[in-house]
Image (cartoon, rainbow, N blue to C red):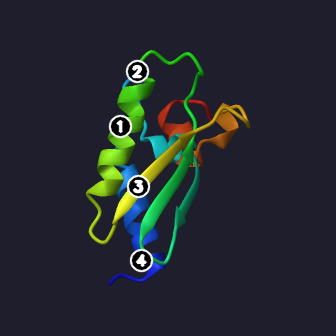
Amino acid sequence: MKEKDTLERDIVIALRNVYDPEIPVNIYDLGLIYEIEVNDEHEVAITMTLTAPNCPIADQVVESVAEAVRAVSGVVDVSIELVFEPEWNKDMMTEEAQIELGLI
């Protein structure tokens, strides 16, 4: 069985392959993932947000995250909590994402 640190790293790699359909940057570098928790049984709990609370494709984005995490070897189950506090803003993006979007 994978170590939790290795599993978390693999989950981040998987999340970097999920893109917001409206923004050409992955959801992890956009700062939409607030927390990744992996318990001893390798059940994963993700707390995330969206760029806007009224996002018309919210269900699609959440399902894409769940599918990506479920596909990681060693993950037993995944649950996702969608939150809007704190509210997402561009300062939550990685520097690479800000550069890619021409914000810096």
Q: Quadrant of residue 87?
A: top right
Q: Can residue 24 be seen in this view?
A: no
Q: Residue furthest right?
A: 86
Q: Do the residues labelled 1 and 4 touch (CB within 8 Å)?
A: no
Structural distance between the alpha carbons of marks 4 and 2: 31 Å
Quarter placement of the N terminus: bottom left
Q: Do the residues labelled 4 and 3 touch (CB within 8 Å)?
A: no
Mark 4 neighbour density, 10 Å: few (under 14) some (14–19) many (20 or more)? few
Q: Is mark 2 on a helix, strand or loop?
A: loop
Residue 76 against residue 25 in the figure, above or below? below
Residue type beneath disc 1:
Glu
Give the label on residue 6, or none.
Answer: 4
Q: Are marks 2 and 1 in contact (CB under 8 Å)?
A: no
The numbered mark, 1 or 4, whose residue comes first in the sequence reads 4
The numbered mark, 2 or 3, whose residue comes first in the sequence reads 2
Quarter placement of the C terminus: top right
Q: Is mark 3 on a helix, strand or loop?
A: strand
Residue 3 against residue 50 in the figure, above or below? below
Q: In which quarter of the image is residue 63?
A: top left
Residue type beneath disc 3:
Val
Please give the name of the residue rendered at 30% of the width and 47% of the height, measured from the top-left corner. Answer: 67
Residue 15 against residue 77 in the figure, above or below? above
Residue position marked by numbered label 1 in the rendering: 63
The numbered mark, 4 or 3, whose residue comes first in the sequence reads 4
Residue position marked by numbered label 2 in the rendering: 57
Q: Is mark 1 on a helix, strand or loop?
A: helix
Structural distance between the alpha carbons of marks 2 and 3: 20 Å
Residue position marked by numbered label 3 in the rendering: 78
Structural distance between the alpha carbons of marks 4 and 3: 16 Å
State the residue in front, 90 or 34.
34
Please give the name of the residue rendered at 57% of the width and 27% of the height, measured from the top-left corner. Answer: 51
Q: Do the residues labelled 1 and 3 touch (CB within 8 Å)?
A: no
